[in-house]
Image: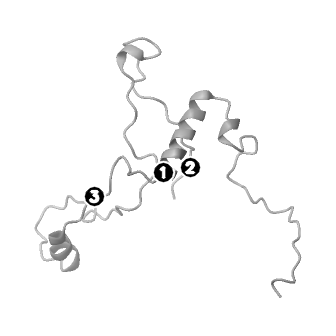
Amino acid sequence: MFYINTPKKRDEVNLKPYLCPTETRVADIEDENRRIFMEQAYKHFVSNRPRHRLVPEVYQWEKIFKIDHKTRPMDAKRRPFELGENMYNRRLDEHALKYIPRAVRPGGPKSRPKFEATYYPNVRRQ
């Protein structure tokens, strides 16, 4: 029965609710800095290079004594797995910002913007 069904046009459903209707490709972005940033971020993301901040390593003794059997309750809780944080729940914008040296800052050497602007989309976290 699945193969017999014919496709129908659905006008009432928006199939691309989060995509911008005017900028469908990175090449369509008018702001040059934003276009370069988005292209570099995309290329770095799809190249599967290691992230700027790697996932913290859980050592074998920690897995045995702290996670599996909880035999060290008096130790200070400093590691992410002890504080209830999910180490694998990371975002793309969690990295150190790119520094602009004083000599090449756009407003002069004493100007305020010390780091390059990032153009990540504003998405609310749930």
Spatial separation of the CA atoms under disc 3 and disc 1: 22 Å
Q: Pointer 2: what residue?
A: 123
Which residue type carries mark 1?
Ser
Q: Nearer the viewer, residue 76 or 8?
A: 8
Which residue type carries mark 3?
Pro
Q: Please, is residue 14 above or below residue 102 in the view? A: below
**Rendered residue at 38%/62% (across/down):** 88
x then y, percent, for residue 59: 19, 66
**Rendered residue at 53%/36% (across/down):** 37
Mark 1 secondary-structure assignment: loop
Q: 34 left or right of 65? A: right
Mark 3 secondary-structure assignment: loop
Q: Pointer 3: what residue?
A: 56
Spatial separation of the CA atoms under disc 3 and disc 2: 25 Å
Q: Please, is residue 48 above or below residue 103 in the view? A: below
**Rendered residue at 56%/29% (across/down):** 33
Residue contact at pointers 3 and 1, CB within 8 angstroms: no
The answer to which image quadrant residue 26 occupies is: top right
x then y, percent, for residue 60: 18, 71
| Of labels 3 and 2, the one closer to you | 3
Q: Earlier in the sequence, mark 1 or mark 2?
A: 1
Quadrant where the N terminus is found in the figure: bottom right
Q: 93 left or right of 34? A: left
Q: Please, is residue 87 above or below residue 33 in the view? A: below
Q: Earlier in the sequence, mark 3 or mark 1?
A: 1
Identify the residue at the far bottom of this view.
1
Spatial separation of the CA atoms under disc 1 and disc 2: 23 Å
Image disc number at residue 47: 1
